[in-house]
Image (tube, helix red, strand yellow):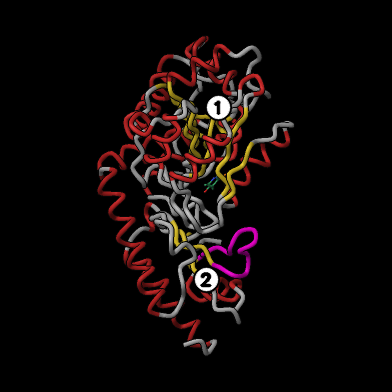
Amino acid sequence: MENVLMIPGPCDVEQDVLLEMGRQVVCHYGAEWADFYNKTCDLIKELLQVPGEVFIVNGSGHLAVESMVLALGESGEEIGIVDNGHFAHRMIEILETYGIRPKVLEIEWGKAAAPEQVDRFLSKNPAVKSLALVHSETSTGALNPLEEIGCIAKKHGVAFAVDAVSSAGIVPIGMKNYGIDLCAMASQKGFGAPPGLAILAVSKRALEIIRKRKAPTPGWYASLSVWDRFRREQTNFQPYSISMAVNLIFALNKCLRAIKEEGIEQRYKRHCDVASMLRRELNEMGLDIFCKEAEPTPVITVAKMPEVLDSIKLINHLKNKYNILIADGLGKLKGKTVRIGHMGKNACRINIIALLYGIEEFLRKEGII
Ligand SMILES: *Cc1c(COP(=O)(O)O)cnc(C)c1O
């Protein structure tokens, strides 16, 4: 079962973080716990310049994304979604299950959203009062320009919501400077902790809007109105009213302190360096990168397979011979691309070299090179 996890999350976890998971379980209320939980939230606030509050709840990235999109579109106001990949499309699917039909700006897979496109979209759709997009799109490898799009959203007076599930902890994000109101995250990708926590950062402005809503945000488990109410009441020093995954919060806290120690700019540079090394060598072997035109994300690489080969053969070769796990393409890219995660612990040259060795060997065996 144990492989080097070079899939687009989860990624391998540092030993000292794993040890946190083995600590005795503690009670999820009381002053001591509240203090630890709040300090963990503070580390996220500092990392992302959060101009408001951070919520951490048992769940995965999807929970954070669902909670985020449900907090948009008060009293039937239109929600805009920038759709340029599988995870962007997932936001539309989630809203539709609640009977909400967002306005969609469709962009070809593999391209990043251009700020001018978003500007035109918002000018044409003045009823749209909030805009959601994915920062680092895990299906295509494209990175949407947050800062520029944040400016456009601000110009139109539109609330700005970002799925940063894969990018947070690797790509520097300044919620305050970029004008981001809601930012959805998870423990197991850029932060490098095991899977199991949904994280949502919310600006003061967005919290005020949520508190003034005529009806609370829908649902209970995914409802930001519910999270916010419990956080404010803090009955019995309980930051949230469910049995908390305390060991995961220990692990996340450890990761956040390690990120702070490395420095987010340095961490970003480390990821950019291994990503460009990998892409250069893949190109040398004749493999194209899927999102050539967009500024690619440093978090993962999506490589096109030669037409005659199904991606599953390469995936099996790497797994069976080298215990390295990479992932198949998502949605319409299944079989045609592979997705290689290089995050956190695995964003190191030695792993990339081993991976490249296996890929080259496979391409030779198949007579491609
Ligand atoms: C992984 C991912 C998700 C979903 O996260 P889960 O923790 O698997 O629920 C959402 N958005 C993006 C961009 C992702 O990479």
Percent position of residue 25, x then y: 49, 30
User: In the image, 89: left or right of 130?
Assistant: right
The stretch of residues the image draws in magenta is 325-337
Position of residue 339 in the picture relative to residue 255 (left or right): right
Q: Earlier in the sequence, mark 1 or mark 2?
A: 1
Determine the secondary structure under disc 2.
Answer: strand
- Residue 146, image x, y percentages: 41, 41
Q: Which residue is mark 1?
A: 129
Residue at the (55%, 43%) spot, across then down:
82
Mark-to-mark CA distance, 1 and 2: 37 Å
Q: Is residue 331 magenta?
A: yes
Helix, strand or loop at label 1? It is strand
Graded by Cα atoms within 10 Å as few (under 14), some (14 to 19) or many (20 or more), the crowding at tag 2 reads: many
Q: Nearer the viewer, residue 102 or 304?
A: 102
Question: What kind of residue is marked 1?
Answer: Lys
The quadrant of the image that shows the N terminus is bottom right
Q: Residue at x 66, y 14 (%)?
A: 215
Q: Which mark is residue 304?
A: 2
Q: In the rendered image of this protein, does residue 17 appear above or below residue 129?
A: below
